[in-house]
């Protein structure tokens, strides 16, 4: 649903981009987001409480009515869910009796195997963000423009098509997760994602090497140094060696003759954020002989990052997208599940915010190719961690999944040794079976 939401958001944005985007279109984009929010709010007014809430309050009939609506009257499923809720509530009461007023969070950190599962669950959510997925999704338009696509509306439509790829990619693990298992899908997906990040970095290296070089002998041509000019920004822009480095800076743009995009100057952007003109030099006014490009450079490698983004999203959607959520839904005991899932989700959104807020600054500090190579390096650490510590949970009941995170010593203690009486009984049963066959 998240992937589908990105498609709809991009499609709506692309549609409104045709309606005076600088004055009216962007307002419609923001207003359109209020429509699903309003529908959701109205829906919440008719949303019943959960069956678990009703059961905890002793209102079983109301819980059963809710489940009948959810499962369209299939009594087998209703009975199954009712029994599951009863087991959960009984387990919860038992835990409260055993642990008294001790908080669930404290108990989690004092229980070694649950603590280990939580750390791995949070690590999976953290590395899901460190592969740079939301950098790609949030800044798709910026990345496409950086690759050399000039038209902004075209950029938005390409973003819409790329977001559709992720939605398609999520279909494969739905079919394969029970055949291949969680662990192989996770590792294969992460390997593909790392390789895609390296290819993305390589694509931007190619763009950088192919972009127009700046002639140091002409870097100050046409600039009128005066008392009202910020000379420090002029010197900063003039220090770049090519168009790609120039346009990566948020303060600079590439000014070149309209008939030749392979030579020019790096000049400061107009004060106030108007990126259509420079503040000084030949591109500071309406000059038909010069063009000012603030976001991209013309190169022969424009398509490369776009193609790699498609490959990246397919690899991510295959495993790194869903597997952290699947893992966190399966590995915790009932008494700790809600708290652990909440903590892992908090980890996901925390690193989502961190990676998203730092991408533009990171891209300016170590360039876009450096940012993608950095994500690939961090993701490789995650691959090593997952290879050695993430177990396979396919087909295991929750009791056995819990055992996977215990030490070997604790696992042996969990399995009760057979007494001599049990062994004798088993031997008698075996002899009885043999005589029956004879």
Image (tube, helix red, strand yellow):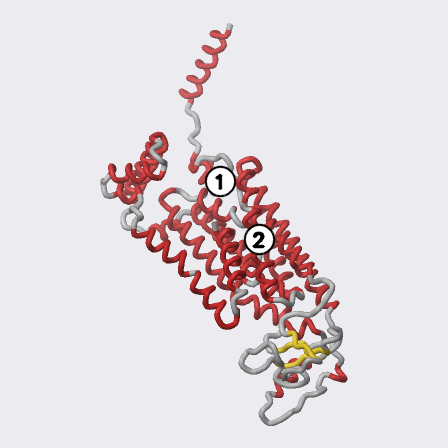
As measured in the structure, the alpha-carbon distance from the residue carrying label 1 to the one carrying label 2 is 20 Å
**Toward the viewer: 93 or 268?**
268
Q: Nearer the viewer, mark 1 or mark 2?
A: 2
In this view of the protein, which residue sits in the foreground, 63 or 264? Answer: 264
User: How many numbered markers are drawn?
Assistant: 2
Classify residue 201 by image quadrant. bottom right
User: Sequence order check: which comes first, mark 1 or mark 2?
Assistant: 2
Label 2 Cα neighbours within 10 Å, binned few <14 / some 14-19 / many ≥20? many
Spot the residue most to the top.
Answer: 438
**Residue 8 appears at what percent x and percent y?**
50, 55
The reply to whether residue 413 is visible in this rendering is no
Residue located 42% across and 44% down the image: 332
Residue occupying image coordinates x 62% and y 88%: 231
- Disc 2 element: helix
Q: Which mark is residue 293?
A: none
Q: Secondary structure at mark 1?
A: loop
Q: Which residue is mark 1?
A: 404
> Which quarter of the figure has residue 172?
top right
Q: Quadrant of residue 267?
A: bottom right
Q: Are marks 1 and 2 in contact (CB under 8 Å)?
A: no
Identify the residue at horizontal 63%, vertical 84% (top origin): 285
Report which residue position mark 2 lands on: 382
Q: Is residue 335 above or below residue 308?
A: above
The x and y percentages for residue 430 are 47, 14
Q: Report x, y in % for residue 156.
A: 57, 62
Position of 84 relative to 336 (above/below):
above
- Which residue of the protein is positioned furthest toward the bottom in this rendering? 227
């Amino acid at each position: 649903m998240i992937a589908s939401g990105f498609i709809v958001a991009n499609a709506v944005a692309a549609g409104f981009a045709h309606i005076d985007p600088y004055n009216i279109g962007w307002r419609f984009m923001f207003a359109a987001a209020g429509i699903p929010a309003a529908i959701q709010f109205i829906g919440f007014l008719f949303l019943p409480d959960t069956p678990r809430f009703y059961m905890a309050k002793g209102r079983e009939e109301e819980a059963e009515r809710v489940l009948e609506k959810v499962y369209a009257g299939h009594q087998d499923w209703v009975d199954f869910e009712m029994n599951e809720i009863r087991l959960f509530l009984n387990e919860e009461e038992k835990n409260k009796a055993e642990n008294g007023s001790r908080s669930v969070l404290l108990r989690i950190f004092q229980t070694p195997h649950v603590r280990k599962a939580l750390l791995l669950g949070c690590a999976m959510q953290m590395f899901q963000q460190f592969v740079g997925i939301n950098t790609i999704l949030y800044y798709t338009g910026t990345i496409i423009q950086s690759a050399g696509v000039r038209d902004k509306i075209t950029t938005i439509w390409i973003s819409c098509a790329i977001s559709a790829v992720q939605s398609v990619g999520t279909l494969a693990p739905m079919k394969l997760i029970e055949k291949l298992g969680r662990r192989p899908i996770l590792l294969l997906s992460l390997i593909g994602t790392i390789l895609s990040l390296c290819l993305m970095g390589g694509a931007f290296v190619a763009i950088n090497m192919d972009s127009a070089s700046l002639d140091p002998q002409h870097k100050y041509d046409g600039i009128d140094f005066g008392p009202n000019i910020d000379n420090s920004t002029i010197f900063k822009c003039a220090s770049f060696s090519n168009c790609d480095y120039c346009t990566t800076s948020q303060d600079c743009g590439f000014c070149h003759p309209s008939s030749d995009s392979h030579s020019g100057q790096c000049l400061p952007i107009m004060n106030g954020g108007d990126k259509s003109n420079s503040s000084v030099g030949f591109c500071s006014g309406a000059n038909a002989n010069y063009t000012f490009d603030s976001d991209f450079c013309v190169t022969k490698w424009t398509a490369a990052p776009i193609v790699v983004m498609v490959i990246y999203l397919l690899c991510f959607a295959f495993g790194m997208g869903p597997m952290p959520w699947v893992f966190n839904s399966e590995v915790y005991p009932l008494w700790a599940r809600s708290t652990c899932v909440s903590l892992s989700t908090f980890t996901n959104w925390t690193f989502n915010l961190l990676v998203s807020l730092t991408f533009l600054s990171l891209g300016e500090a170590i360039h876009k190719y450096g940012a993608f190579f950095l994500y690939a390096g961090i993701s490789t650490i995650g691959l090593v961690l997952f290879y050695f510590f993430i177990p396979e949970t396919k087909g295991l009941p929750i009791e056995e999944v819990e055992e996977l995170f215990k030490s070997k010593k604790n696992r042996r203690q969990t399995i009760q040794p057979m007494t001599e009486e049990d062994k004798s009984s088993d031997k008698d049963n075996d002899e009885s079976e043999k005589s029956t066959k004879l």
